Image (cartoon, rainbow, N blue to C red):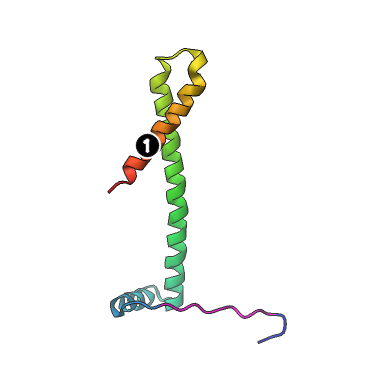
């Protein structure tokens, strides 16, 4: 190892024979190494997680805004802060309900 370069740890993991066959087939199909296929799959997994969080935040804001609009016609201007808080609670409840199987 050259001086000044840190050793990069090489992670390992266990998987079923079937999973390994699928990974090998994908690597062959894409003309990539097995490491490339696994690295791409892990990167995709974490990217999707961030996208899902962003989607949930966007959905929350849409539902909250909808709740404000629906309730606005029924309140006077002095109750707007209370209205916004209630709309936020409505949005949270809606998203929690969506997460249930």
The reply to whether residue 100 is in sight is yes
Left or right, 98 with respect to 43, comes to left
Q: Position of residue 25 (x, y in %)?
A: 33, 76
Position above or below: 74 against 7: above
Left or right, 88 with respect to 3, comes to left
The reply to whether residue 63 is in sight is no
Local packing at callout 1 (Cα closer than 10 Å; few below 14, some 14-19, many 20+) is few
Callout 1: SS = helix
Residue 91 sits in quarter = top left
**Closer to us: 9 or 94:** 94
Position above or below: 32 against 74: below
Please tell me whether residue 6 belongs to the stretch shown in magenta: yes
**Closer to us: 68 or 81:** 81
| Residue drawn 35% across the image and 75% down it | 23
Please tell me whether residue 43 belongs to the stretch shown in magenta: no
Q: Position of residue 4 (x, y in %)?
A: 72, 80
| Residue drawn 41% across the image and 39% down it | 59
User: Which residue is the site of mark 1?
Assistant: 93
Position above or below: 18 against 79: below
Position above or below: 96 against 10: above
The magenta span reads: 5-13
On the rendered image, what quadrant is the N terminus found in?
A: bottom right
Magenta-drawn stretch, dominant element (helix, strand or loop) = loop
Q: Position of residue 9 (x, y in %)?
A: 56, 78
Q: How many marks?
A: 1
Q: Position of residue 27 (x, y in %)?
A: 38, 76
| Residue drawn 30% across the image and 80% down it | 17
């Amino acid at each position: 190892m050259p001086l000044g370069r840190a050793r990069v740890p090489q992670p390992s993991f266990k998987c079923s024979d079937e999973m390994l066959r699928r990974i090998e087939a994908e690597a062959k199909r894409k003309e990539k190494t097995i490491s490339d296929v696994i690295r791409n799959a892990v990167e995709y997994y974490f990217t999707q997680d961030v996208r899902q969080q962003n989607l949930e935040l966007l959905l929350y804001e849409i539902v909250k805004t909808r709740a404000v609009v629906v309730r606005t016609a029924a309140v006077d201007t002095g109750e707007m802060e209370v209205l916004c808080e209630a709309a936020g609670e409505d949005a949270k409840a809606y998203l929690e309900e969506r997460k249930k199987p």
